[in-house]
Every structure is written in C-alpha cells, then in structure tokens.
C-alpha cells in the first residue's frame, strides 16, 4: 500500500492543490478499504424503531460509528410513538470518525481536508449503505454528513453486544439489576414488559454491556 501511494504521488505531486484526479480519488478509496478491512460492525437499537447505531470496531477499538434516525412523533409528555420502523420516514444518517484516521490518511495522501471528507462520504455509501439498508429492511437511506470527533482523538475499547442471558439469571435477577442501575420503578418495568414482551431482558443486556464498556475504558 505504501509503495503504491509513493508511486502515484510521484506522478501527482505537482497537482497537490488542484482538483484531485481520478487516480488520487481511487487511492483514497483503496486506503479506506485497507483501513476498514477486517473490522466488525455491531448494530444497536438505541430507541425502539427510531434510532439505530452501527459501530465499526477493529483490533478491539472503535474506528467509526454510523447513527441513523427515523421519524418520531412522540410528544414530550404522553404516549410513545409505537409505529413499526416500516411506517416511519427516514430522517437522517451521520457517520462519525476519529482524528487519528484523518491525520494518518492526510499524512499518506496530500489532499484537501474538505474534499477528503466528501470522498469518505462517497466511499461509505458505496461500501456499506446497501448492507445496512438490508439489515433495516429499507431502501431509502442516504448519508447526510461525515463528522470528525473533536473531544477525543481515537475510539474507545469496543464491547460486542451481549445477545443471550446467562442460564442462572432469573427474571427477578434482571429486574433487581434494572432497579439498581436505572430510575425505573418495579411497576414501570412490569408495564414495559407487558406492553413489549422481552423488554426486561433487552434492557438488562444493554446495562451489562454498558457496565463492561465503562469498566474497560476506565483502565
């Protein structure tokens, strides 16, 4: 990869501040392919039928995150919007990346930062958006923006989603854990479970993952 970069840049060095050529654009795409190669994508339904996040992890650390949001008509006070995802309009999708990735890419390829962000947006749509649409059973997604984190240079340690509850954990154990780690009351927990069977287990597993994330990233 480094040798390919040097070869192409030798040809293009005098065009550094002009509009990038197809060769340099393809070089950026190849660089991104290499950077994301071997990464795992973890999906997480943050809010029921409204917000879905997709976390990209490589070598144990997050390298990017896609946040997708859909129409939500829940009032500030009142019943929650219960429509299934299929009945909600797509709202927006944003890709969040880290300065360490941008700095490394710019050190390898002399290209204007704003144009680089545009190329990352194009590459991501071409590479991952169809897969994510299939996961959500949609065909109307598009990427609205690419943002670079400003409050930290690189991603945190990744914690894969926890999919199954340990066999020795009872529903009462899960309720007690939720009571200790949230502001929910028992009657609220039971009401949520009655309205959406599986809510207790889903909330319990999310809390376990959050606790493990906090533990690993405090070290």
Image (spheres, rainbow, N blue to C red):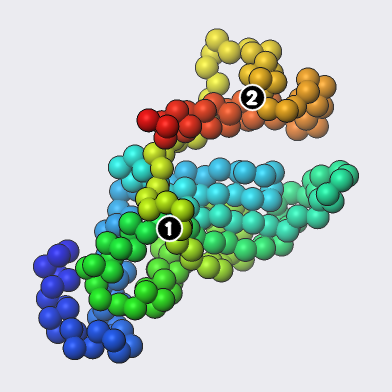
* Residue visible at 61% across and 43% down in the picture: 45
Can the viewer see residue 40 in this picture? no
- Residue that numbered label 2 is attached to: 181
Could you say whether the residue bearing mark 1 is in a helix, strand or loop? strand
- Residue that numbered label 1 is attached to: 97
Frontmost residue, 207 versus 42: 207
* Residue 184 in the image, given as x and y percentages of width and height: 75, 27
What is the quadrant of residue 139 in the picture? bottom right
Q: Crowdedness of circle 1 by 10 Å Cα count: few (<14), some, many (20+)?
A: many
* Residue 86 in the image, given as x and y percentages of width and height: 71, 54
* Residue visible at 45% across and 69% down in the picture: 121
Contact check, label 1 and label 2, Cβ < 8 Å: no
Which image quadrant: the N terminus? bottom left
In this rendering, would 29 be left or right of 41?
left
Picture layout, residue 203 above or below residue 26:
above
* Residue visible at 46% across and 53% down in the picture: 151
* Residue visible at 33% across and 59% down in the picture: 101
* Residue 111 in the image, given as x and y percentages of width and height: 30, 77
Q: CA distance from mark 1 to mark 2?
A: 30 Å
In this rendering, would 219 be left or right of 87?
left
* Residue 212 in the image, given as x and y percentages of width and height: 47, 28
Mark number, residue 145: none
Picture layout, residue 125 above or below residue 49:
below
Disc with the residue nearer the chain's start (1 vs 2): 1
Can the viewer see residue 168 in this picture? yes
Q: Crowdedness of circle 2 by 10 Å Cα count: few (<14), some, many (20+)?
A: few
What is the quadrant of residue 35 in the picture? bottom left
């Amino acid at each position: 990869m480094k040798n390919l970069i040097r070869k192409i840049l030798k040809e293009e060095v005098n065009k550094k501040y002009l509009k990038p050529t197809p060769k340099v654009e393809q070089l950026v795409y190849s660089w991104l392919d290499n950077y994301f190669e071997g990464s795992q994508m973890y999906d997480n339904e943050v809010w029921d039928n409204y917000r879905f996040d997709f976390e990209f992890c490589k070598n144990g650390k997050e390298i990017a995150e896609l946040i997708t949001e859909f129409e939500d008509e829940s009032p500030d006070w009142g019943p929650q919007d219960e429509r299934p995802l299929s009945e909600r309009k797509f709202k927006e999708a944003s890709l969040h990346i880290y300065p360490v990735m941008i700095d490394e890419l710019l050190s390898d390829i002399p290209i204007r930062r704003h144009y680089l962000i545009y190329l990352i947006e194009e590459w991501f749509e071409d590479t991952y958006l169809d897969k994510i649409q299939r996961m959500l059973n949609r065909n109307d997604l598009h990427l609205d923006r690419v943002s670079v984190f400003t409050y930290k240079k690189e991603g945190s340690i990744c914690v894969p989603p926890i999919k199954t509850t340990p066999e020795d954990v009872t529903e009462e154990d899960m309720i007690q854990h939720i009571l200790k780690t949230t502001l929910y009351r028992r009657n609220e927990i039971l009401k949520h479970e009655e309205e959406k069977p599986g809510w207790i287990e889903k909330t319990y597993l999310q809390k376990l993952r959050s606790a493990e994330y906090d533990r690993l990233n405090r070290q």
